[in-house]
Image (cartoon, rainbow, N blue to C red):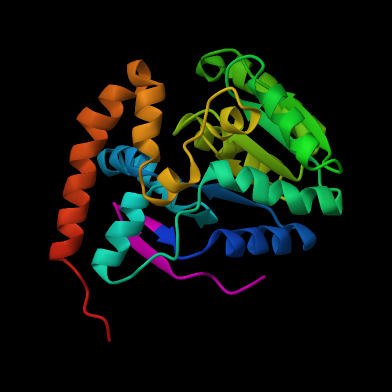
Amino acid sequence: MPEAPRRVLVGGVTVDALSEAQVVARVVAGLAAGRGGRIVTPNVDICRSAAADPALRELVNTADLVVADGMPLVWASRLLGVPLPERVTGADLIWSLSGPAAERGWPVYLLGGPPGVAVSAARALVRRLPGLRVCGVESPPYAFDRTAAGTARVLRRVVAARPRIVFVGLGFPRQDRLVAVLRERLPDAWFVGCGAALAFAGGTVPRAPGWMRRAGLEWAFRLVTEPGRLARRYLVDDLPFAARLLATSLLTRRPIC
């Protein structure tokens, strides 16, 4: 396994300074050696939640890999003088990790989203990657994890399928709490908390064009397409946090030697 990557403190969480290609290489090396792991992809919203709750901050920082799914974190790292190489999103990792899984016969499991979303994502992945083995798809009932019985049912199904990569799209922190439990039961599997990645992959929710993603404007596209669900989160909660993050990062910039 490659040596541990440099971690950057940004937005109140520690983020690994890795490109998407480097993340994929580390996961592939781990799977080949029979070692699993947990990937968290914090964005501004996750950082804001983690800043207010030490338990959530610990949930993020103890992951095996933490990569920035949000351009404000990348910008802040540059202002701090400890630049992250690029944005690495769950929506991209679902494709870039499924590629080597298809080539090497590693089964994947898709968990999350409203009814039908995981099935649509599985179909899209297999169409593009015909050798991919999807060993399970599930869109559990809303709030299934509020009861021990509901959580146990989902855990049993995932463990019984024996996946090597699991994409969990339940939103933070629900997906990451579930992953922390699954990680103990499937130590040779990798888990990716991927938010809306299943909906994007299956085409049930449109994703921003590439130029908007590269410019850090994906949030604006999502706001226009889902205003009722995202307006308060993005404009009232996240935008002020992002502004403070960038201002603070500029004021505390580290000198480059």
250 displayed left or right of 37: left
Residue located 20% across and 28% down the image? 236
> Is residue 136 depicted above or below 29 in this figure?
above
x, y percent for residue 251: 13, 64
Q: In which quarter of the image is residue 43?
A: top left
Q: Give the range drawn in magenta.
A: 1-14
Looking at the image, the residue that sits furthest to the bottom is: 257
256 displayed left or right of 98: left
> Does 43 appear in magenta?
no
Residue located 51% across and 15% down the image? 143
x, y percent for residue 239: 22, 38
Residue located 64% across and 43% down the image? 94
> Does 13 appear in magenta?
yes
Q: Which of 14 and 98 is in front in this view?
A: 98
Q: In which quarter of the image is residue 1?
A: bottom right
Residue 60 makes an appearance in the image: yes
70 displayed left or right of 22: left
Q: Quadrant of residue 234?
A: top left
Q: How many marks?
A: 0
Residue located 68% across and 53% down the image? 36
x, y percent for residue 105: 86, 48
Residue 189 makes an appearance in the image: no
The quadrant of the picture occupied by the C terminus is: bottom left
> Is residue 185 depicted above or below 14 in this figure?
above
> Is residue 230 depicted above or below 248 in this figure?
above
Looking at the image, the residue that sits furthest to the left is: 251
